[in-house]
């Protein structure tokens, strides 16, 4: 019957006319759908660009380019605390509402996390609240401040003291030895600290990145994060190794590090009867499922070790890179901090330790906090699902005066957590784009600290925050006491390059973690020994 009808239609209608009719129908259908989404869809009252009301293309485009954080800042500046950022996505920047969502596992991580880099999820990527809780119980003791403080000598030895040895060597062999200066990359220096410290604390041995001057690991992490963004929004790319050979090679490189470490550790235990130490890797190998008693399988171990490399290095290292950039762009802040450090700790032969730096250098705390405000290292696309009815979600959620329904029409709606936009909200932060550490020293310091979400909040609070603080305090305090820093004469960014009267930041990207986009070009600095 249908065959006859189609034949009759084709026989009575010219092909160009038929094609034109079909195209017209498709255009009208798309326009109708757009109008329905815009005027009567479940998110129709949420402000935002017209295109976003029926298309996710602008959102996905910015995610894949690593510019989502810039895009979200722009939209929230124009439209307010809640913005329609896609046909089924809203973006949230209100700090108190963000804390409400992060306080519970009811707002599960979005579908993007299910398209993870590896075959099994990690503690950071899993959407399973029970798995997240289990991993946190299994690893939590190693991330406690007491545990990190007990390992502070290792953090110093394989961290800032190792970098000082490397940079002193650069000064000794520099072509500008007469002027006693050397050009180094603070980005790769800080990433070297991150990898070597997580190597010794997490894998039982340093990766020796600093001593070898190797940039491979830092570049591999950057490539893997780029690939993760592609996997999340374009799942088909998982089968397109031929199209992205460099990015897949970066993923394989990181996976190989974890695989070799696991196999080496298991071999050591089999031969010697016990592990060389109880570190993060050993905790993962020894962990058992609380219900089945089963050990963590190899694919899950690889995923966890890869996550450890990213979370334990890229976050802290990028934060220190942004902090150094801001100090170089704001000379008054740099001079004040150096003066404070050198006055409080004049003995260059004794390393500055975490507890004494935290107690005696309030301006250093303020500088780090302000840097994390302007450049939260986790600034990428962070979607959350609306709670299901059986999770206490009821029929929807009120956010910033807008009701976001959970009924079938909005079943796929996701809330994007816009940390970067929250940290640049002008109603919370006067002159939000200006680097001003005084925000964290004055009468509003406590309230401002509460509105900081650099380490997330609530149920998903960053497990590694204690290690991060110890690394940042010891690294920055010791380096700024020992060296004078200045930008090279041909530096493309600095106090000389202003936008709207504010020093322009070097370009950045954020897929999950965010850091400088062109570190080999933009993160060079000239160092010289500070006068004792």
Image: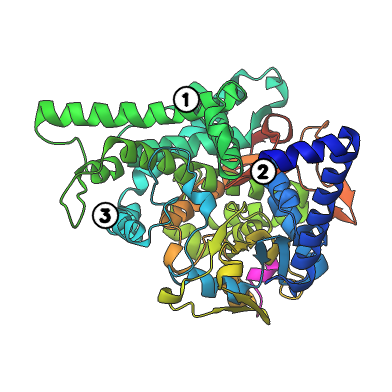
Q: Is residue 157 visible?
A: no
Magenta-colored span: 438-443
Measure the C-alpha gap from mark 2 to mark 3: 62 Å
The C terminus lies in which quarter of the figure? top right
In the rendered structure, find residue 223 and report the number of the disc placed on it.
none
Pinpoint residue 366: horizontal percent, then vertical percent. 62, 63
In the rendered structure, find residue 2 and report the number of the disc placed on it.
2
Q: Nearer the viewer, residue 311 or 352?
A: 311
Q: Secondary structure at mark 2?
A: helix
Pinpoint residue 277: horizontal percent, then vertical percent. 21, 40
Crowd class of label 1 (few under 14; some 14 to 19; many from 20; radius 10 Å): some
Q: Secondary structure at mark 1?
A: helix
Q: Is residue 448 visible?
A: yes
Q: Residue at x 89, y 35 (%)?
A: 14
Q: Mark 3 highlights which residue?
A: 138
Of the image marks 2 and 1, the number of the one nearer the N terminus: 2
Of the image marks 2 and 3, the number of the one nearer the N terminus: 2
Q: Nearer the viewer, residue 518 or 40?
A: 40
Q: Mark 1 highlights which residue?
A: 211
């Amino acid at each position: 019957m249908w065959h006859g009808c189609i034949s009759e239609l084709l026989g009575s209608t010219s092909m160009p006319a038929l094609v034109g009719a079909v195209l017209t129908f498709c255009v009208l259908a798309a326009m109708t759908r757009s109008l329905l989404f815009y005027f009567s869809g479940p998110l129709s009252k949420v402000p935002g660009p017209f295109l976003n009301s029926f298309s996710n293309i602008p959102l996905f485009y910015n995610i894949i380019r690593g510019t989502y954080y810039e895009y979200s800042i722009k939209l929230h500046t124009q439209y307010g605390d809640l913005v329609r950022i896609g046909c089924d996505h809203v973006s949230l920047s209100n700090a108190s509402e963000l804390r409400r969502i992060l306080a519970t596992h009811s707002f599960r991580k979005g579908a993007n996390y299910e398209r993870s880099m590896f075959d099994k999820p990690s503690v950071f990527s899993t959407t399973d609240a029970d798995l997240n809780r289990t991993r946190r119980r299994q690893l939590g003791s190693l991330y406690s401040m007491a545990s990190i403080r007990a390992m502070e000598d290792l953090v110093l030895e394989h961290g800032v003291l190792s970098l000082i040895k490397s940079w002193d060597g650069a000064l000794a062999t520099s072509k500008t030895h007469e002027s006693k200066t050397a050009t180094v990359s603070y980005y790769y220096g800080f990433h070297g600290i991150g990898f070597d410290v997580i190597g010794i604390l997490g894998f039982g041995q340093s990766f020796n990145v600093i001593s070898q001057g190797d940039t491979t690991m830092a570049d591999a992490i950057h490539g893997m994060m780029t690939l993760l963004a592609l996997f999340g929004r374009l799942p088909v790319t998982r089968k397109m190794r031929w199209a992205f050979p460099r990015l897949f090679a970066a993923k394989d490189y990181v996976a190989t590090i974890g695989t070799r470490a696991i196999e080496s550790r298991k071999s050591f235990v089999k031969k010697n009867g016990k592990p060389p130490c109880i570190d993060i890797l050993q905790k993962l190998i020894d962990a058992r499922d609380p219900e089945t008693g089963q050990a963590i399988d190899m694919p899950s171990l690889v995923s966890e070790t890869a996550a450890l490399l990213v979370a334990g290095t890229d976050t802290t290292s990028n934060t220190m890179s942004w902090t150094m950039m801001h100090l170089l762009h704001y000379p008054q802040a740099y001079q004040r901090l150096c003066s404070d450090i050198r006055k409080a700790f004049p003995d260059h032969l004794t390393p500055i330790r975490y507890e004494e730096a935290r107690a005696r250098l309030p301006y250093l705390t303020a500088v780090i906090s302000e840097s994390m405000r302007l450049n939260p290292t986790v600034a990428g696309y962070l979607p959350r699902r609306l709670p299901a009815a059986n999770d206490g979600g009821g029929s929807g959620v009120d956010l910033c005066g807008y009701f976001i329904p959970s009924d079938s029409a909005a079943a796929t709606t996701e809330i994007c957590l816009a940390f970067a936009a929250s940290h640049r909200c002008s109603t919370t932060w006067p002159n939000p784009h200006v680097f001003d550490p005084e925000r964290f020293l004055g009468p509003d310091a406590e309230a401002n600290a509460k509105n900081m979400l650099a380490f997330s909040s609530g149920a998903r609070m960053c497990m590694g925050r204690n290690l991060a603080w110890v690394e940042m305090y010891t690294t920055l305090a010791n380096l700024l006491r020992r060296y004078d820093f200045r930008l090279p004469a041909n530096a493309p960014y600095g106090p000389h390059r202003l936008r709207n009267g504010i020093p322009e930041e070097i370009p950045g990207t954020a897929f999950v973690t965010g850091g400088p986009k062109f570190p080999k070009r933009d993160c060079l600095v000239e160092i010289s020994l500070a006068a004792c």
